[in-house]
Image: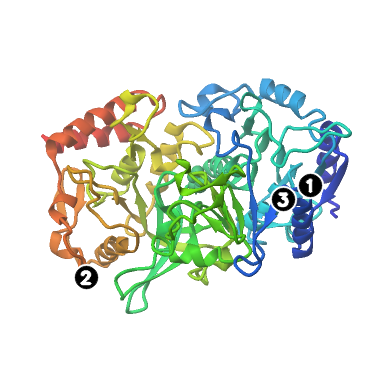
Amino acid sequence: MTKNKKLLAWVNEMAELCKPDKVHWCDGSKEEYDRMMDEMVASGMAIRLNEKKRPGSYLFRSHPSDVARVEDRTFIASATKEEAGPTNNWRDPKELKATLTGLFNGSMKGRTMYVLPFVMGPLNSPFSIIGVELTDSPYVAVNMRLMTRMGKDALDMLGEDGDFVPCLHSVGAPLKPGDKDSTWPCAPMEDKYIAHFPEERAIWSYGSGYGGNALLGKKCLALRIASAIARDEGWQAEHMLILGLTNSEGEKTYITAAFPSACGKTNLAMLVPTLPDYKVETLGDDIAWLRKGEDGRIYAVNPEAGFFGVAPGTSYQSNPNAMHTIERDTIFTNVALTDDGDVWWEGIGTPAPDHLIDWQGNDWTPDSGKNAAHPNARFTVSAVQCPAISPDWEKPEGVPVSAMLIGGRRPRVVPLVMESRDWAHGIFLGSVMGSEITAATISDKIGQVRRDPFAMLPFIGYNVGDYLKHWLEVGEGSDPSKLPRIYHVNWFLKSDEGKFLWPGFGDNVRVLDWIVRRLKGEVGAVETPIGNLPEEKDINLTGLKDVDLSALLKVDKALWAEEAKAIAAYYEGMDRLPEELKEQLKGLQERLK
Ligand code: OXD
Ligand code: MN
């Protein structure tokens, strides 16, 4: 256990409030993990997969109402509404604490409270952050063991006097004596609260057992709370993958990329290049903490220890490294179960078997007319199982970043790649990046762009205007030659007939190749009103057929004039938008004339 007084007092206080039957301090060992899995298999919550096909792996099925992060029920309870800004759901911290205290009162009755000490970032690094999650979900406990450095090591690092971010979590389904438990207990939507208290640096999450709502180290701590800490301390917590690209001369370039959810971050992080001269090593697929080093360069650390990836669409063709990573010792959630005890999902690359059990536990055949796996079905797995994991991925100081990629799904308007003119222009591009809405319940939104600044829209723990100012400040007082260059990429351009113009996946290395050669000064660029674009001859298309580079690198001034208008309208809604970004917009409008 621990002698840390603050931790002991807090665990006692929360146990008194939540009233669990038992309190269990997790040591994070494999024995404990196996024991908890055995218990969950016995209770019917987990299904052990076929040892021969998927050794050490389990399947969980969530409640159909609890399948994803719930942005509508995610709250930033900063002191004032202005602090939370226009992109967050704000609640008064005192009122929200009172509501939640009412809900947590007795919420763990009939259950065990698991105490999960965990570290975000490498063990014993001065830059890492310790959290302690209290949860009544054993599913959360086993996932946290894979996604973070959890257990005894974290307690040792905390020591007697160390500080931690308190993370309280309950599925919100207390049991009375004799009640039969559900295999996925959770609370109704209107009672779910994913609450952040940035000033107090605390997280209270009630009612959901799924993903980022419940594994509190990830989106809640490493992005929302960490972004607020980072602003105060002069660093950055970003929704970015980190990869290392080695060329044939053995030179390594570290690249980060911020794409909105479901735009292929895991695929790019684990890319298998189609150009033989390159090798990609993975450092992280979702979150990067960025800090300026003593040499003036920006260094990136992945605070997580595992991957919580979307299963549907992942195949040996789209992401072979992810498929190898999850061949064993993996937790699957909401995928389909095959008759021989393995997993299957849409886009796995093998034809659908004649019979499956779908993600809701029902018989499924190809004629069922519905998905066998939930579109947001997930795998949870330790990062060390990835065959492409970089030897540098746990370096406490991180790796020096040379290029940052940003981008979303833009079927029109935005070219395959453009280099920002300078740091401030890169921040401008990051502030307006996003994806075109292709399927919406409100059909008049189709075709509009959902702007998602640096892919952080649901994850900024404070005012978006201040967040963008913080990005600009990172550049101020820096030697521009040491800062990473910012590139806007777009793998999703379509022809008028609706066909993708770019092959994507492993072929994205062709864009990385241009970027690396550009960083080295080996290739030039065409200056356009929107940024610097490659010359067609400089994109290596060896081995590819029928790629229309002129369409992929087109700058349509009329469409961009429309885009500039849409950006102006978007900026209107931002109360604390830095002047410099308004200047950037004016600059674009001038250049388009
Ligand atoms: C994720 C997300 O799960 O961004 O990583 O939604
Ligand atoms: Mn993400």
Decide if residue 197 is on the left or right side of residue 407: right
- Residue 550 lies, in percent from the top left, at 13, 53
Q: Are marks 1 and 3 in contact (CB under 8 Å)?
A: yes
Q: Residues within 10 Å of mark 2 (few under 14, many from 20)?
A: few
> Disc 2 versus disc 3: distance between alpha carbons?
47 Å
Task: Name the image quarter holding residue 15.
Answer: top right
Q: Amino acid at mark 3?
A: Ala
Residue beneath disc 3: 141
Farthest residue in the left direction? 593
| Location of residue 90 in the rendering, given as x and y in whole percent from the top left corner | 56, 24
Provide residue 418's location: percent of width, then percent of height.
24, 51
Q: Is residue 152 visible?
A: no
Amino acid carrying mark 2 in the image: Gly
Q: Residue furthest bottom?
A: 249
Q: Amino acid at mark 1?
A: Tyr
Res 422 seen here: yes
518 and 469: which one is in front? 518
Upstream in the sequence, badge 1 or badge 2? 1
CA distance separating discs 1 and 3? 7 Å
Question: Disc 2 vs disc 3: which is toward the camera?
Answer: 2
